[in-house]
Structures are given as C-alpha cells and as structure tokens.
Amino acid sequence: MEEPIQDIAHLGHIELLTPNPDDSLWYFIELLGMEQVHWERQSAYLRGYGDYATTTLKLTESDAAGVGHIAWRAASPQALERRVAAIEQTGLGLGWSNGDFGHGRSYRFKDPDGHNMEIYYEEEKYAAPEHLRSTLKNLPMKYPAHGACVRRTDHLAVLCQDVARNRQFAESTLGLKLREQVVYDDGASEIGSWMSSNAVHHELAYVVDVEGQSGRLHHMSFWVDERSDVMRAADVFMENSIFIEAGPSKHNNSQAFYLYSYEPGGNRIEIYNSGFYIHAPDFEPVVWDETSRGTGVYWGGALPASFLNYATPVVAETASADDTAEILPFDPH
Amino acid sequence: MEEPIQDIAHLGHIELLTPNPDDSLWYFIELLGMEQVHWERQSAYLRGYGDYATTTLKLTESDAAGVGHIAWRAASPQALERRVAAIEQTGLGLGWSNGDFGHGRSYRFKDPDGHNMEIYYEEEKYAAPEHLRSTLKNLPMKYPAHGACVRRTDHLAVLCQDVARNRQFAESTLGLKLREQVVYDDGASEIGSWMSSNAVHHELAYVVDVEGQSGRLHHMSFWVDERSDVMRAADVFMENSIFIEAGPSKHNNSQAFYLYSYEPGGNRIEIYNSGFYIHAPDFEPVVWDETSRGTGVYWGGALPASFLNYATPVVAETASADDTAEILPFDPH
Amino acid sequence: MEEPIQDIAHLGHIELLTPNPDDSLWYFIELLGMEQVHWERQSAYLRGYGDYATTTLKLTESDAAGVGHIAWRAASPQALERRVAAIEQTGLGLGWSNGDFGHGRSYRFKDPDGHNMEIYYEEEKYAAPEHLRSTLKNLPMKYPAHGACVRRTDHLAVLCQDVARNRQFAESTLGLKLREQVVYDDGASEIGSWMSSNAVHHELAYVVDVEGQSGRLHHMSFWVDERSDVMRAADVFMENSIFIEAGPSKHNNSQAFYLYSYEPGGNRIEIYNSGFYIHAPDFEPVVWDETSRGTGVYWGGALPASFLNYATPVVAETASADDTAEILPFDPH
Amino acid sequence: MEEPIQDIAHLGHIELLTPNPDDSLWYFIELLGMEQVHWERQSAYLRGYGDYATTTLKLTESDAAGVGHIAWRAASPQALERRVAAIEQTGLGLGWSNGDFGHGRSYRFKDPDGHNMEIYYEEEKYAAPEHLRSTLKNLPMKYPAHGACVRRTDHLAVLCQDVARNRQFAESTLGLKLREQVVYDDGASEIGSWMSSNAVHHELAYVVDVEGQSGRLHHMSFWVDERSDVMRAADVFMENSIFIEAGPSKHNNSQAFYLYSYEPGGNRIEIYNSGFYIHAPDFEPVVWDETSRGTGVYWGGALPASFLNYATPVVAETASADDTAEILPFDPH
C-alpha cells in the first residue's frame, strides 16, 4: 500500500473577477460580513473573521466575472518544491511569481482545463488591528456579528470539459484525494468529482461544463458557524435583492446545508455549513450514479436548470434565473 | 369601534381519518414522537409533549383519509353558550354530543363547506403517569427527545369551494380574526384566508379547492421548538421513506419555517416553527395579490403542483407527487 | 365562573433611564441591533425590527439608571376607560397626559410600590422609510442581521417591597393573569409573581426587593428569533466588553433560554427566546417552593448573588459582579 | 524546517470501565442514542451513527470507573511500524495483541503516566444491517434521531502527574501536535496541553492531576451535529436524572460548546459541538496564562470545583457535586 502524503496543506485563497466591483464589494463586506484588509490597483483583499491568513479572497475588477486564480498552500517548503517538480513534469507550469499581498513567492500553473492556479508556502498570518482584536486568544479577529457573518473560505467548484483528466491531474500532481464522485452511463461518464487535501470534505470540485467551455467557475463557498447562519444569509439576501438560486437545503453528496446566490458581479456564491470531515486514511470515495444521485438534494427544493449551465464567465446562450422550474439530473455543488 | 371578544380560547383538537391506521400510528408515535394516551374502538388518542390537554389528535380508521372533525375550546361556559346560539342562527348546527375521551359535552356543527366542527368548554388536563412526568413543573409531560419531537398541535388548513363565505362564517359565528389573505383579480377572488382566535398567527386557514370538492383537508400542522427540529424531521422522514412534498423552507405569509409530508394514511402533515405572534388589538390583515404573493415561498424550494390540488380525501384525478416540478401560483399553507 | 376579560392588549413600551446615554445608545443600536426612530430633548426612541409600534423603548438621560415608566396598551378605547376607572378607585391615579412620540394620550398612575405606569390606546404603527422597508409584507421593518438583532420588546421584571400587594393590584386593576409564582415558607412568603395580559408567558414580574427599596427595575427583556441568537448576543457582548451576569442558560420557570447583561447605563438587559405560550383559559398558575424552585435554573450556570440584589437605581451597598460565585436561592427572571 | 508527518490518522476508540454496566449501557444507548453492535464477556461495543468504524466505544464492567485503554489508528501499515519502533525506544511498549472486535492486531503501550494505549492499522468499517441502513450513501448508519443523538467519538482528556512529560511523549512518540496550552507561573507550570494528530482541534488532552494520582480519566467527549443538540442533551439529562456538572456553555480554549455529565458508572462524559479545525501547517499553539485563561469559560456558567478534582477512578477524598459553587482557576476540557 502506498503511504498517504499531504504536500498541500489546504486551499489558500481565491481570486474572483467582477465587472461590477463596487457592488461586489458591498456584497462581500455588508452582506457576508467580510473585512477588507487591503486595496491595490484593481483588487480588494478580503477575509472572513476566522481565517488565520491575512486574506483569503482577492476581488479584482475585470471585464467579465469568473475565477482569476486558485491558490494552494503547501505543507512545507520541501512540499512546495516536490509539488512544483511534479507540476513541471506535466508541462502545465508557468513559472514563479514574486508573491502578492499576504503571501510569498508562488509557482503558477494551469490545470488541464485552463484554470489558473498557484502554489506557495509563505503565508502572512493575520494580525488584527486593535479595534478588530478578539477577546478570544484563539480567534484571529473580532466576531463581527454582521450579515451572513462568514467565518472562512471553504471550497470552490469549477467546470471543465473533461472531469476525469482534471481529477487525475489534481490527484497525481497536487495529491488531492477523491471524496465523492458522480458517474453516469455505467461508469463511462464522470460527471463530477469532489476532492480535498485534508480532512475537509472537499476543497475543489470538478464538474463537467455542459456548455463545452473551459476555465469557468461554478461557485465559491464560505463556511458559517451554524445552519441558522445559512438561513440568516437567506433573509439577508432577500432583504437586499440578491438572487437566491437554490437552498437553503441539504445536499446528499457531502450532507451539507447550502444556499446559492449570485453576487452582483455574477459569480455564484455558496453559504455553507455542516457536512462531515474525513479522517479515515483508507476512505473509499462515495460514487453516485443516475439513480442514487437523483437531483443532488437530500431534502429541500430541487435545483433549477440554471444550476447546471450557469457559470462564470457567462456564455451568451446560458440559462438564466428564468429556468428555475426545471429539475436537474445532477448538481455540481 | 366594536370591542374585541374572544369566545374561542383556541383550536382544541383534530380528528384525522386514515385508511392505514397501523402505519399512521407508527408515523405519529415513532416519527413525530407523540404519545398515545388512549385507544377506543377505531380511534387512537394522541398528544404532543407540551399539550396541556390530555389529547389533541384523534386518529380514526376510515375508508378514506381526511379530517373527521375540528374541535374548538370555548373560553368559558358562557362563551360556549354564546357561540352555540350564534351557530344555531346560521342553521348549520347539529346538536349536542356527550363528549369524548378527554373533553366534556360539545356542540356539533358544520361550516358552510361541510367540514365537521364542534365546540366545547370542559377539557381534561393531562396528568402524566409517573414514568412520563417531567422534571419541569410547568411542562405537562417528560420531553421525549424522539423523532421530530413535536411539542403541540398548532393549526390546520382546509379547502373549500367559497373562501369568502367560510371565512365570514368563522369571523361572525366563531369570532376568529383574519390575519392574512390571498386575493387575486383585483380583489375579486379570495383564494385563501388565515385566521385565529388568539395571538397564534393562524389556527384555521380556508383555501379554495381547485378541484371543486367540499370538506377536504389541506394539512394539519404541529409545532416544534426550533427550526433545527424541522430539519431533524426532514432527516427522519428521509430515513423512513416518508414522502416530503415541500420544505424545509420559509413562507412569506406567516414567516414560518415549514416541512410538508404525507403521513402513511395520505394526510398532509406540516412540521412548523417560528413565524410571529399577533398582539395588536387593531391588527390589519395582510393582503397579498398575484404579484406580492408569488409562490408563497420567501426562500427555499418552490411548492410543487401537488401542493395546490392534493388534499384528503383524494379525488380520482388529483395530481400526485409526480407533479413536483411545476411551480404554483399560490400556496395554501 | 367569572368570564375572562382582556382589557390590556399587551405591554406597550418601556422608558429606561441612563446616566450614560451615549454608551447606552451604542449598546442598543450597535450591539442589540435596534433602530433609532426619533430623538427629542433627553430621550432617544428605539424599536426592534419586528415591533409593529413605532417605538417600544424610550431611552432617557438621567442621574441614575432605572425604569422611567412602563406603558400598557389597552385593547380598545372602551377598555381604556374601564381600566382608568378601576385605577382611579385605587387612589393611585395621576391623571391624563397628552401622549408622547408614537402614542396618543395616556393615563398615568403608580403601582403600589411606586413604579410609574401609564395606559393608552392610540398607537402609531410603524411606517418604515424606503431604505428600511422589508421585502416581507408582514414584517414592519427590514431584517437588520446586525448584532443580537432583537426582534421586539418582550417583558420586564421589577422589584418591590410587597409582591402580593403589587401582584393583586396588577390582577384586579389591570386584569393581568398570574402565570407562575415562587412562594416560600409554606406559602407565607410570596417571593415573585409572573403575569401577562395575553398568551405571552409573562409581560410583568414582581419580585421582592431584598434591599427593601421601592420602584426599582430588575431587568428588561428583548425577544430574539432563536436560541442561536441568544448565543450570538453572548459572543457580541464578550467581544465588546459588556458584562454578562448570567447565561446563556435555561430557566425552569418559563422554560426560556436567557442571557443577562448590564447595558452601559447600568440597567440589566435580558436577551430571551423560547419558553411557552399560554392559551388555556383556565390555566392554573405554577407555584414553586424552596425545593422545586432550586436556583431558578433548569440547566446552565447558577445565578450569581448579584442577580438577587443588583437592581437599578443601584443602592450604595449593593452587591456587584464580584459576587458572582455565590449561588442564589431563587431568581427573579 | 522539519517536515510535518502524520503517522496517527486519528483517535480510534476508547474503552471505558464501569462498575454499573447496566445503567451505563442505558445511558449510552437510550440517552446518547448510540448503537450497540456487539457483546462479548464483560464488554459492550458501541458506535455513534456517523462513525465509519464498526465500534468506537468499548464499555467494560469493572470494579471502578475509568479509562480501560485509548486506541490510535495509524495512517498506514508503514506508519504503524514506525510508531511501534518509536514507542519501543521509550521502554513503554507492552507488545502486540491479536486485536479485538472491530480491529486487527495492535501494539499495546503505556504513556508515562500509566494510561493504557494501543495503536493499530486494520479497522473494520461498519456495514449496517438492513434496518439500520441510511438513505444517504455517505452516512454509515441510519440517523437515529434519538436522545442526544451523538454522531461520533471526538476526543478525551486524561489527568497526569507531569503534563510536560506526557505531552512530550505524545509529540515525539505519537507525532501529535500541540494546539493549546495552559501554563502558569510565568511558564514554569504546564497545567494542561491539548493535542491532535489531524485537523481536529484536540483528540487528547493532558491535564495535571491535582490529587497526584496516575492513570485517571477526566472526560470522554462525543460530537453532536449542532449546538441545539447539546442543549437537547441537557434536557434529556435533566429529564432522566443524570447529573450535569457544567454547561451548556462555551469554552475559551477551543471555542467549543460543551455539556459535562456523569454517566451512571461515574465517568465524566462531554457532549460537544462547534469550535474550530486547524489546517495551518505552521499553526502556533495558543498559550494561556492565569490571566488570559480565567475560568476556562468564554460565556456561560463557571466550572465547579469538582471539575478540577473529580476524575475516574474516584479517589476517596475527591470533591463531589456538592462543590459546584466554587469557581475554578482553570479547566481541563
């Protein structure tokens, strides 16, 4: 038996692109309760109150919505070197950057579908200014009790043309472990794969892009402390005219309680809680087929058609919120 | 200004009919966590752990599902006499009964749509046997912590051919107060009316029967302590193959968090929490039209077509759970 | 049997006195999430997002903390006249006022212990400005999702020298109904009595003042939507250096989940949820003695000594937060 | 920088000793909602509904309460060999067993304080019988919705004479990582250390035994899905005369929401939720001193004196529940 290795410590941060930066910023700060820690050129740097890193979300003005890049923190300097060597062998490496606000130099690369990624080790831990210091020594920042009050970045899901190929890249090159999978046609069609580097249920999901596009984002997800916070987020979104696409409801895959909204820039954002952690070293991925998968919902409302084909950047003919009545065969949460 | 009177203290108990008594009993006892306090001929008498009355649900074997009768507790012996006099003037009175297990003599009548009702004053308060006695002096029965763990009967909704006529009967004859209302066609079509005798948001709702039937039940509703209990009920129903028709979700009307299931006898049962109480003596009913009403859902999944036309007893051509994809123009919750 | 009457619709509003108005205002607005609707001379007028009245808390600058006055809304103009006639017979009437911001003329009086009260009928319903309008037609104000996010004023507890005398006054003159009671010494010592005019468990409690003072406030209580909100309030108080005296814990009396803090002006403020409503017209008050009462806590931390003798206005020798280690024989929640 | 290794996958299972096996079994099955999967000689084998292993709690009849042994699952066969080699070097190894119900051969050893431990790799995954199969493919067992409904074993805390020595053993020999620590006297006195092998906040805590005993158990802890479940457990314990020593309250260390009870055999059992997971590879242990530690409670009731000196097996002169009024200088949660 091969020994497990964990060269990736965790999903580090994500860059979201928005064509509507002011409103997007309002959404993340006023509605989600995030804190802005820095502003530089076209980008705002944000954090959840429980994130140990200085920043976990970089919000960048752009012509179109989507994911700018996905950053992984290596478990050690040596692990970083090992992963970079593995990436370089795939021919998908782009080279080293000098780092960015909050973290040191990073190695940039693309996954097979073309999503920009980077890996780094040096992370700047958050040091709260006096007025944001918590009375809890083990909490990086004062609890804001504001809006959805997201605690930390949890995971993201991206679309791709070939799930198997991207999943294998993440497994062999990054060392992510497969957690759950939707496979149709008696195993012939890999529809979606959920993976993580650690005990978190999933940090990265690859789901097939039914529009045949490349490099698109399905959603980014934030963790809140309780299911009550997910429901409070729904109230907050309703009171502030934010489109709720699905939820609050419970997934079968992951068992999580979810809420999907579109932030004003167009990116789908999930508010997320519960589910389960995975500690078994010999965990066997859970595989769902057409029958067992159903609509991807354990209980709560069915997922609308837009959940299947809406992604950022938006493609001209993409389904919109008008398609909410149709039930989906699967969900890429 | 006319002075408010409250001759009806509260909704007393409900008799449900079931063609599948063993399975229905299993549902109410094992899944909802109710206690059976009595058995007599074709009827089982049940209670929630927080009900002060000995029994609030009478479950009776019958050829078809539906509501057997709806019982109101008067606020005093004098109030009982006043209400009986008012009912007799309508010509809908049926006469006095000798009472039933748990309550004294009652005056039986029909509402204009033909639902059987009764009104009584003498109620037997529950005296728990030793093994069911709570350690809380103000709790009638030991907390069961079992299944959905419903605390008490909350309300019911019935269908009828003429909502306005039945609503007026409930107002003028029983003294119920109108709380919320769905009115379409610029006020010409009264689709549904929610009423109560006290601070509870609604104890009785009349909603139009789109099948043109009479005397049918839309749903009966049980109160649980928290929204978490509603979600636990959803888990319990999923694990025990009980059909969940809608929810957990939040209504706009009433603001309540709801879950609709079909008990094995076919009656729609709601698990219910939150919403708001009404204490203003001059509360103005909230009126919703086509636009403001939407689908009746504030957030969470849309209501399926079955929610509109499924009721008990079931009519031959009625929609079934297969219709769950279609969004409804309103909901009679 | 005497017929029940309900001439008092509900507890209307409360005036709190504070020697520290700026900080008190910060506490109610920033930490509790209330909205300020008016400012006049030494008083700020506040509301919870779910209150139907324009204002339910009047915060007035004063030399010492305490309750300014307690206002009851009558159920009708006729009910107002009846209650005024009854009050005048007791010799405790003070005469009519011209009303205040938010309500019309009121009849002012004192309870036997000297607390200022008033009764009125004309209440101005809240009309939210555009930016505070809710997307829910039945919610008076946009959900703020801020701090403890209190929904509405719930009840208050005052101290007095003679509980029985004040309780009888409230019963016979105001028509409040006794709900729960703590009686020691084989019935000889009435320690506390909890009363309400409607289905709310209690709107007013009288508890003996162990310091032998008159006219003092024990606490004012705000309702939040869930027990999670009570716990969020505890986090908010800890992060903002607000003294938490007791809780979050569960009372035996009322079954409610509570949290007691001191607002910066010194008044004890409770954040409150759950418990039970009372609909039985023949509800029998629950009486607790030394044994059954215990410490007044069903589960959670014991109440500190300060809970017994701290009240506003503060008396020179009163216990302070330093006494938190001693367990109390009862609690006047 | 040394690279992180994780040879221990997670805390595997715990054996509790009870002089009162029938009542202990009733506590774990009826009140906590665990499932008994096996019975052999003096031992019952139990599990939470979310445990992937067949059994995580072995309950063994004994003359006195306490912990029988603590079992760690290795991350791989190679990791097992590495850890055994490391243990053997300390001279604390006892040799190989043939395994037990649910797991394969194990290497037995003692920690420096004398607690029995074992390490193994082969774990039998739970295969639910038909009637206990969940409708969720990724849930090992049907959700019971019964009593406290504990999901899985979370952690344990043991007392010892020399915290530093035992902590160093766990770090260097087992590879556990230090998460939080209470150190008094300007760093001279290590009072307690909380450690884990993975992202769980802590799986094992060593706390100083103020009675100077060896090998004692402070508490074993079970994870529930929500804070509401912790509160439901409190209701269940109150209704079934189980002694609640402390909570529901929130710790400062770990940020967790806790409830401590004594099971009928005398062992302290914690019901536990929330807190935070640790993913930073360079996490710096949080160190609390006399001032920052306070009573170990963030909010909620203070911990009683018994929490400091009560442990199993009980020593003759140990404090009992009568000491609940005294506030503790620290808490070994």
Image: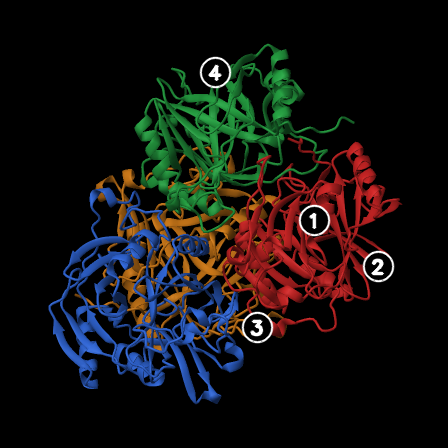
Chain colours: A blue, B red, C green, D orange
Dot 3 crowding, Cα within 10 Å, few <14, some 14–19, many 20+? some
Q: Chain of mark 2?
A: B
- Look at the numbered disc 3 and give the secondary structure of its residue: loop
* Separation (CA) of disc 1 from disc 2: 32 Å
Q: Chain of mark 1?
A: B
Query: Where does residue D192 sit, x and y in percent of width and height?
Result: 33, 48
Q: Nearer the viewer, residue A147 or D177?
A: A147
Q: Give the residue furthest to the left.
A: A98
Q: Which residue is mark 4?
A: C211
In the image: residue B195, left or right of residue A119: right
Quadrant in the picture for residue A10: bottom left
Residue type, mark 3 in image: Ala
Q: Which residue is mark 1?
A: B167
Answer whether labels 1 and 3 touch (C-beta < 8 Å).
Answer: no
Residue type, mark 4 in image: Glu
In the image: residue C220, left or right of residue B109: left
Question: Can residue A12 be seen?
Answer: yes
Dot 1 crowding, Cα within 10 Å, few <14, some 14–19, many 20+? many
Q: Nearer the viewer, residue B6 or C195?
A: B6
Asked if marks 1 and 4 fall on the same chain, the answer is no
Query: Where does residue D117 sit, x and y in percent of width and height?
Result: 41, 62
Quadrant in the picture for residue D209: top left
- Look at the numbered disc 4 and give the secondary structure of its residue: loop
Residue at the spot x=66%, y=71% of the render?
B319
**From what the image shows, is residue D258 above or below residue C20?**
below
Asked if marks 4 and 3 fall on the same chain, the answer is no
Q: Which mark is residue D128?
A: 3
